[in-house]
Amino acid sequence: MKSRHWMFCVAGLCIAPQLAFAKCTFTNPEQQKQCLEREKQAEAAKRERERQEALRKQAVQNDRQAVRRDEARIQNDRQAVSNDRQVLRNEQARVANDRQQVQRLNQEIERARARGDARRVKELEQQRARVESDIRSTEANERLRAEDIRRREADAQNAKANERNVRADEARRERQVANQPHPLSAQGAAPAAAVYPPPPVPPAVIAPATSAAPTTARVAPVAAPAPAATASPLAVRTYPASSIVTTTGGASYATLNGYASYPGKTVRVWFEWGDGPSFGQGATDAQPFSGERSVSQQVRFPTPKKKYYYRTIAESSGLLVYGETQSFVVP
């Protein structure tokens, strides 16, 4: 085998800066086999580490894209809230004008009755009824618009929380890439030096001070390193629930949110939920997609004023990954 690095041998001990650059020139077949096997494992561990780093970098890039989407969504929600508030102010001003018109019509009706003009009284009462109907319709629209504003504000807050979670994931992955242990070190740091059995040279015989038999200085072979552990490329997250409401009829709803990423693969994602951390009370339909995506699902919960737990689950080709557990209280 061609040498890739110098080896230093002193007093029968050979030291190489990196295990991967060992020079396998043993005449002993067993030692040569062990040395070649170590080099083979080292190269495999190096390739695995490079593959994992590429997957993590791809996940970081996906997270950055998700952050940009969340930022655009937050901006759109804020603009929609601003527009809705302006429309709400216009409707409130229109209701105030209509109420003043009702007061004027009441005054005119009283004057018409004092004159005994029944026909005019009837016309004014019909006109007043139309204005009061407009007021009721406008007030109903105001309530709906106010609820829509609250929903959009809650969605913007959830999107902001999702953005913070994604940024935290991005920072965590970047730290993992930066702190990834060297593939040749089981302790997580690249070895400064490795001790090897010496290449086949005449043994250095130490002259005995007595009549004892000569001894040869030898070092036991170093055990081959274990390959680096493989991290799952299927990333799953569970985000806080949004739009948690209880209607006047007593029905309780919440939107469960999550995220999954598996570059180049098809993924099925769903939520499981329950009134305890062991779940088991229900599950949503699976949503299939390819690559990465944020997922949301509205769920009806049976009991108001109760705490519920849920988590995201993703599956791809038999690989099943669970997200974190989130909880909320139904109002």
Image (cartoon, rainbow, N blue to C red):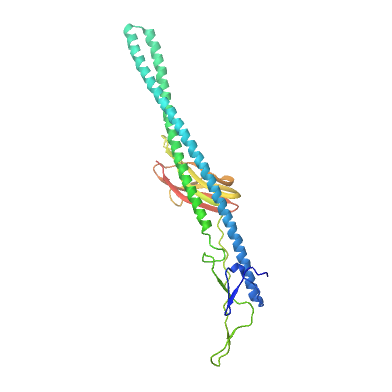
Residue 233 placement (x, y as % from top left) = 57, 54
The image quarter containing residue 222 is bottom right
The residue positioned 53% from the left and 48% from the top of the image is: 63
The residue positioned 49% from the left and 52% from the top of the image is: 171
- Furthest-left residue in this view: 114
Residue 144 placement (x, y as % from top left) = 44, 30
Q: Is residue 244 above or below residue 198?
A: above
Q: Quadrant of the C terminus?
A: top left
- Left or right of 270? Residue 90 is left
Q: Nearer the viewer, residue 134 or 2?
A: 2
Q: Is residue 220 above or below residue 311?
A: below
Q: Is residue 295 visible?
A: no
Residue 235 placement (x, y as % from top left) = 54, 51
Q: Is residue 30 above or below residue 145?
A: below
Q: Quadrant of the N terminus?
A: bottom right
Q: Nearer the viewer, residue 166 or 120?
A: 166
The residue positioned 38% from the left and 14% from the top of the image is: 125
The image quarter containing residue 106 is top left
Residue 102 placement (x, y as % from top left) = 37, 17
- Furthest-bottom residue in this view: 211
